[in-house]
Image: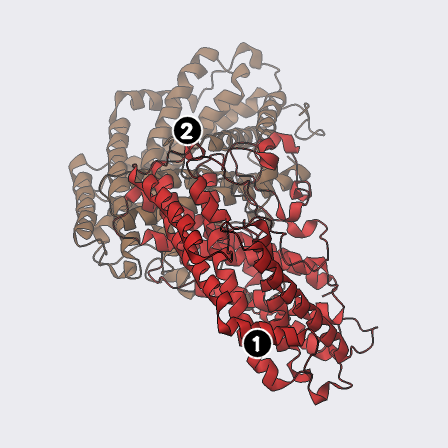
Chain colours: A red, B brown
Amino acid sequence: MAQRHLDPTAGPVPADALAGYLRAQATEFLRALRLHRETGAGAAASEGSVEAARALRRAARRVSGSLHTFQPVLDPDWSEAMRPELAWVSGTLALEHAHASRLQQLLLALHRLSGAAPFPPQGPAAGTTARTAAPPLPRDRPAPAGSAPATVPAGATGTAPGRTGTAPCDTPAPADGTPGTTDTAGRATTGRTTPARATPVTAGAAAVRTGTMTDAPGRGSTATAAAGTRGSALAVAAGGAVPAPDRGNLTVGAAKAGALLDRQLTLARTRAHSTALQALGSSRFHAVADKVAVLASEVPLSPAAAGADLRPLADAARDRLTDAVAALPLLTAGSPYNAEALIHGLSPDPAPHPQDAPWHQVRLLLRLHRYALEVVHAGRHPGSLLDAGEALDRHRDAAEAAAAAAQAARTPRIAPATAYALGVLHADQRHEVEAARYAFQRCWQKEVIGTL
Amino acid sequence: MAQRHLDPTAGPVPADALAGYLRAQATEFLRALRLHRETGAGAAASEGSVEAARALRRAARRVSGSLHTFQPVLDPDWSEAMRPELAWVSGTLALEHAHASRLQQLLLALHRLSGAAPFPPQGPAAGTTARTAAPPLPRDRPAPAGSAPATVPAGATGTAPGRTGTAPCDTPAPADGTPGTTDTAGRATTGRTTPARATPVTAGAAAVRTGTMTDAPGRGSTATAAAGTRGSALAVAAGGAVPAPDRGNLTVGAAKAGALLDRQLTLARTRAHSTALQALGSSRFHAVADKVAVLASEVPLSPAAAGADLRPLADAARDRLTDAVAALPLLTAGSPYNAEALIHGLSPDPAPHPQDAPWHQVRLLLRLHRYALEVVHAGRHPGSLLDAGEALDRHRDAAEAAAAAAQAARTPRIAPATAYALGVLHADQRHEVEAARYAFQRCWQKEVIGTL
């Protein structure tokens, strides 16, 4: 795409805008860090500590992304030293959450595929049909059912759509710059929220699953994690039919698959939790925090920053995005049920799908574009960008969930019924990948027509 | 729907039109029967015998359907005795073909899911990308890719859509009254055709699979069938990785799943073949053939037929269809990736999906509506009806293929890898069910807007 200004009528944007943005994000980072230390003091994960960890990641991503996009106006030595450290922080903190939400997503899918009520109905889910998981739509928007082509009134369908967000672009979105959903209790942030599990039998596992990183001494949190692992191991030993009432409708295979995934992903989550705790206590992290504290008051600009315009740099970030999107198979993605995402569903290659990589890349470029808009437009950017980003988050989550199901199926000595359920689950998540691509394609059409 | 005439400007249609139609179909039945006896004399199934069996079924369905729709103007005793016999003929003859095409569909899907070329490229498939099965589109229409919303030129997508017919209504269709594809060698008739398998190792199985009912003495055809069964049993014994070059890219699980399905469905096909041969030689069939021979010259109309108008009866058939379609969850079906079809993918109930039944019912009612139009409009009806019917054929085929995969997964002592592949296959076919519903919904929208 040729150089096209974000807003041709606006004048140049001085480097001061970047300095202000970086200072604000650095301040946010420090605030989140303080909050995290305060809220994470207990043995149990609190909502506050989860929220604080999220805010930490969020600020680290924004600083790191801005250093990349606006590198020419920043001190090169400083920014080159800073960026990998920030990426390390956000990456390390993200891992635990990723395992937890992946497990949540897979267990929800297993329940949906079994035609069972996902969990004892409570709160907002109580009013929906029992057959479907019926997760609330992203960011509690009104259901997009009314926007679909219809000949029959909604009441005649009998069932609610089992997946979210096939038409997320058709509803107005707040353009407040908040990345993703507002996560309150360590649940899935990618367009899915679930009522908390509160049944006695699985309460241990649920505590591990919903609890996320704390500053608690390692022993306490490890004990909690071990209880959860033991709980699910016990469920497997008891013949696979997990006795919790919320799993009563699962087949043996689905229940065993759920227990297997629970064990494997809880173990991974526990490891990620320990790693994150170690990282936050390390001298490496303290060095990052010190640098961010300096950044909060003084941004090391390069000599070239005086009189420089940030707009061309932001435009370049946008062009990198549009180029990457142009290389995507959007034509295929826009044709529903193209069966493209599952095409290697039984491939002998256990590596991640090569076809996913360009989409993951666009996800990162879209994020950089959004952050650049936040710098240049002082926080404002079109809400459709959020929808497109959310679709790509769904894409990433489903791709990784599908890989986790395939990985679990390679566990030695599992029962055929377990493997069968994991196969269905894998295919389901790969179709979710396809659905997310379709959703992104729709969002992008609007984006191209709209402002960009 | 209120009584609305098919064509308000046209006058009443006398019972003679029905008599003419029934005579023509009866003649066609006798012609096909004669052709079948002539072509099916050899031990191997010939193209002619397959085509003859298809024509037999086709005529039997039309006579039977017309007897139902226009019952008031026909001799009640005669038509009530005739209909179940014709249904028995077409049902018995259809079974063998159904097993053969189901196996073909599942093996194709296994290859597609493995990302492997389905069979050694030859003929029309040679020019397509090796990654996709890329079956030709229904009835050799131009690919609908150009009709999908596009931002990227087709060349940039890199891959061809792996499924057919997501937009079958967007291309012109011949309104010649031909049901489905023109089947030339016993291959799948529901929008999928495949190059014949001609590799030496699987030639035996292929002969059984593509060969369909013949009039040959039972011993000859049974010997062929046994050779095919032995061939695939041998493949399984050889470690699951079927040594044929066209399966070289399959994983062990996919290859074993394919061999298992091959054994089970070939056995079912062989049994259906024997049953069909027995039926065609039975006195019950000879009685039906005698009655059809009488019908070819004289149609037993009721006294009420004199001066009766066929139009209200045809309208009633159409209203039964529109009522049934109105009860379908078309709103859900029209929203892509609703994940509705797989919702009971892991349900413990092995029975067919209850959610499929209304769609199967609409498929039958649509057929009756089409035959009624053929009577009233002397063979002409809108081509979009064919597309809608084709979508429902796809729906039925995919639902039954998914059930066959689930059934195979219940075979005792299969390997986990086999079960995993069958799970992926099952989910894939259930998504094909969902895709077919989406396609039908689109066709029906056009139908409602169009003539109906």
Quarter of the image for the C terminus of chain A: give it: bottom right
Which of the chains bears the disc numbered 2? B
Q: Quadrant of residue A194?
A: top right
Report which residue position mark 1 lands on. Answer: A83
Q: Amino acid at mark 1?
A: Arg
Which secondary structure lies at badge 2? helix
A58 w.r.t. A68: above or below: above
> Toward which corner of the image does residue A315 lie, by quadrant?
bottom right
Q: Amino acid at mark 2?
A: Ala
Q: Nearer the viewer, residue A350 or A208?
A: A208
Q: CA distance from mark 1 to mark 2?
A: 75 Å
Q: Position of residue A406 (x, y in %)?
A: 37, 54
The residue depicted at 43 percent of the width and 62 percent of the height is: A353
The location of residue A86, given as percent across then percent down, is 56, 72
The answer to which of B52 and A450 lies nearer the viewer is A450
Label number found at residue B60: 2
The answer to whether residue A175 is above or below residue B332 is: below
Mark 1 vs mark 2: same chain?
no
- Up the image or down, B367 lies above or below A168; here it is above
Residue at 49 percent across and 32 percent down: it is B355
Residue A152 to residue A139: above or below: above
Dot label at residue B21: none
Q: Secondary structure at mark 1?
A: helix
**Mark 1 or 2, closer to the camera:** 1
Viewer-nearest residue: B449 or B123: B449
Return the x and y of residue A239 as percentages of the image width and height: 29, 37
Residue A334 visible (yes or no) = no
Residue A450 at x, y = what percent?
74, 61
